Each structure stands twice: as C-alpha cells, then as structure tokens.
Image (cartoon, helix red, strand yellow):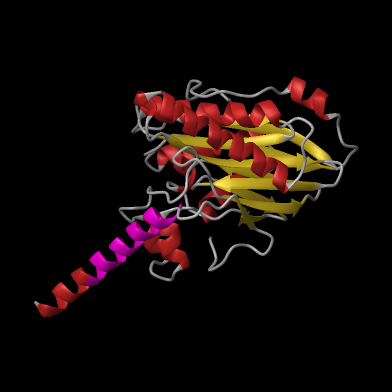
Amino acid sequence: MRTGRVAARTDTGRRRMHNEDVFVCQPPLYAVADGMGGAQAGELASRLAAAALAERAAGVHGEEAVAGLVREANRRIFHRSLEDPTAAGMGTTVTAVLVDEATGTAAIAHVGDSRAYRVRDGVLDQLTIDHSVVGELVRAGRLTEEEALDHPYRSAITRALGTEEEVEVDTLAVPLEPGDLYLVCSDGLTSMLRDEEIGAVVAAHEGDIDAIAAGLVDAANAAGGEDNVTVVLFEVVDGEPEVEAAAGAEKPVAGVQPAPSAPAAAGATLPPAMRRSGTPAGSRWPALLLIAAVVIVAVLLVLVGLTR
C-alpha cells in the first residue's frame, strides 16, 4: 500500500490578525505546528519547528525517529529564544505523522493540543491526546467533554516545544489500511467543531480530499473562526510504495498564510500503543500547579454558593 492524494489548507480565521500555524505536507511527513508567544514569536516558533521536521524527515522511519525530529525542533526553538530577547517565551505545538510505506505503518509524534485523526470505514478516531489544562481535567474526571468545550482555560496547554531545554514527546505507531484517511489539524479546527461535526464534513465530501480540506476550514470559520485553522490530509491506497525522494521532490514543504480561499476523545489513559519519551524531570509541575489552582477555585466557588 502507499499514500495517495494529499491536501493541505490554512486560514487566519475571523478573529486573529496573523496566522501562526505552519504545516508540512512533504511525503512521507505530514505535520502541523501552532505557534504561541505573540504574532512574531509564535510564527517564528512554528516555522522553526516545521523546518526542523522537514529537513531531516527523508529516509527516517519509526517512532523514535519522528520523536527525534521533534526533539531537534524543540532544541532549535529553545536556543533561538535564549539568543533573541524578542522571542523569549515562544513555543509551538507539533503533531507529526511519518509514513513508512514499506512496512505499512505510520509513526506519530505529538506535543501540545494539535491533533491527529484517522477515518476508517466511516469512523473518525482521535489518535492523540490533548496536552492542555482541560484535557488533564477531563482525563482526571473533573470535567466532562461538553464542559471542556466552553471552559475558560481550554486554550491553555501544558506541554509545548521551545519552552524548556528538553521536551516530553508522545509517540504512537499505527497500521495503515487501504481506504484510511488521516487528518492532522491545529486546535483552530477542534475548538470550533466537535468530532461528530468533523466526521460529517468528511462524509459529505467523501472521495474528494480537497473538498474535505476546504469544507473543514469553512466550517470552522462559520462556527466563529476564533483561531487560525490548519488541516493536512492524506489517503492510504492500494499499490506499490513510491520512492520517497521522488515523492518528496514532487510535494515540497508548504508554508503558511495563503489567502483564505487558497489550498494550501481523550480516554482516561494513553492509548495502548502510546509512549512518552524525553521526559524532563519536573517539566510538568507548572501545568499541574495550574490545574490544582483551577480545581481549588472551583471548590471554593461551590462552598461560597452553599453558604449563601
């Protein structure tokens, strides 16, 4: 089997002045980076991440390889922030899918709240988990999925590239099957659309991957377009694997900020095959403290309400 058609699209959205998302659509690598830290710093972080991924993706395979690409991206962003005071504190999410056609598998590396999905036999499955405050609260049973959609901290992430010298990377290997459709996206899509709405757009344009990409961006904007929205999709089809170098040459890295019309549920635990690598000691304490503070405030508000 091999990858078939690909599509990618990014849009600034209706509320933001700048697009800090970057995507890579360079077979065998498909990735989305969503920058943070202000317009210039956020865009710089996401571009550095995309460049680091794309430069070294050729000829590498497997979970450890794609995790290594993400760690290299983290190193570049972190050191750039040390060298450039205007970029201090910048960071980015990254979700990257590295396809190995020879073995019929895809390796996913993930940091942040961008996501990877797979559509198989009409069923949409989220393959990554969100490294975010609300994601942690949902997994801890403190919030329902519905409550998380409108939570004031829904955009606060607990893990990102570039904020520390080392980064914890989640990885996952999944088998490919002919007919699969993979979607990598920024949270500008998933904060606007529920999974069932994403699935409905995919079903409405079944067989037309470009129309799916356009439909998802249009639907996110129609729902409010509160953030930059980026989608990258690729199909899996029957056939002999293509030569990677040739595929990469035909479909180079794509950039950001084309005109809006231009193509361009987390469970209680990690998925069974998900792994974490590169865990820095103490790196999650700030996020855990923030989560604890949110829970304490919620409890205090309840107690105050009961005493009235």
Residue 129 at x, y = what percent?
54, 55
Q: Residue furthest right?
A: 240
Tell which of 213 and 136 is nearer to you: 136
Depicted 99 relative to depicted 58: above or below = below
Q: Is residue 286 magenta?
A: yes
Q: Quadrant of the C terminus?
A: bottom left
Nearest to the observer: residue 287 or residue 122: 287
Q: Would residue 78 be counted in the magenta stretch?
A: no
- Residue 232 appearing in the image: no
Answer with left or right where residue 179 lies relative to residue 16. Answer: right
Helix, strand or loop: magenta stretch = helix
Q: Name the residue located 78 percent from the left edge and 38 percent from the top edge.
A: 3
Residue positioned 55% across, 50% down in the render: 168
- The residue that appears at 54% across and 34% down in the rendered structure is 75
Q: Which residues are magenta?
A: 283-299
Task: Tell me if residue 216 comes above or below residue 286 in the rendering.
Answer: above
Q: Is residue 39 left or right of residue 277?
A: left
Front residue of 90/83: it is: 83
| Number of marks in the rendered image | 0
The percent position of residue 285, horizontal first and vertical second, equals 40, 57
Residue 69 located left or right of residue 260: right
Judged from this view, the residue extending furthest toward the bottom is 307
Q: Position of residue 220 (x, y in %)?
A: 45, 41
Q: Residue furthest left?
A: 308
Residue 51 visible? The answer is yes
Give residue 184's quadrant in the image. top right
Of residues 280 and 120, the one nearer the viewer is 280
Q: Quadrant of the N terminus?
A: top right
Residue that appears at 63% across and 46% down:
109
